[in-house]
Amino acid sequence: MMLCRLKRCELILNLIQIIYRYIQITNLNSFIFYSHSIPMNFRKMSKTATTSTLNPDAPSFVPQLQSHKNTYNVTVIGTVFDGRHKVGDFDWMIKSGNYDDSLFIFNDDVKRNKWKTGGKGNSIIRKYNKYANPRNPRSVGIVTGHKKGFALLTDEVRSRIDKNLKEVVKTIQSMQYRKVYYSAKTPNGLLGTGIFKVGKDVLEYITHQIHELEKIDFRC
């Protein structure tokens, strides 16, 4: 009986060693692909992780990924609108030609999220989204309301927001953008709104998720 138990333990130890060697050889490449996948429900996670898992319930034990030479990180910049023809006026910034390495996020509504025409406020740059400019999208809208602003961060609201965040990541990767701009109440602060009255938890969620983009390793 004791001999059988020893043999079982020996077999288990050998199996563990084989798995450990396999992980070393593959360098966790499967996790690298996962770090760029969706859904976009990413929240705060352990600071030891070098890449966001894009999952709101991600455990703190997500493996730390090895850095790769052919990756880069974006810089997120929250600007305050303080008049036309200056930084913070996204339409002017795009037209200026001085921000060709940048993607611009604007506040959108559910009904018009796939429209090609500009709207009021910073949604004037909707005319630069992928539906209007499939070869060179310069903007992505994140919905903040439907007929009226989202009051609470419900599962449905989160799902709609995450779908837009997925599009943000996809656009950054495909166009190789290095910077991401969004409208803020204070520099790099909470998402600014002008048309809709949006719940604080919704604004905090969107703002946090936008800043989480800096944690993603985008492939060159």
Image: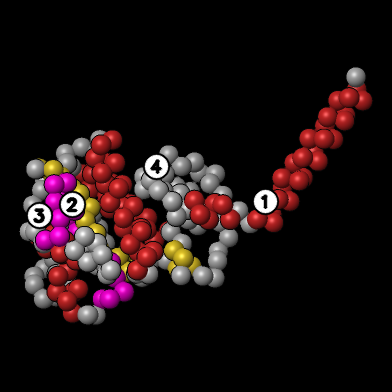
Labelled disc at residue 113: 2
Q: Which residues are magenta?
A: 99-117
**Residue 91's image quarter?**
bottom left
Point out the image quarter for the N terminus.
top right
In the rendered image, which residue does mark 1 sit on? 23
Q: Are marks 2 and 1 in contact (CB under 8 Å)?
A: no
Q: Nearer the viewer, mark 3 or mark 1?
A: 1
Labelled disc at residue 194: 3
In the rendered image, which residue does mark 4 sit on? 56
Is residue 108 shown in magenta?
yes
**Which of the two discs, 2 and 3, labels the residue nearer the N terminus?**
2
The reply to whether residue 122 is in sight is no
**Which of the two discs, 1 and 4, labels the residue nearer the N terminus?**
1
Labelled disc at residue 62: none
Q: Nearer the viewer, mark 2 or mark 3?
A: 2
**Which of the two discs, 3 and 1, labels the residue nearer the N terminus?**
1
Badge 1: residue crowd in 10 Å (few <14, some 14–19, many ≥20): few
In this rendered view, identify the residue nearer to me: 156 or 181. 156
Q: CA distance from mark 3 to mark 1?
A: 50 Å
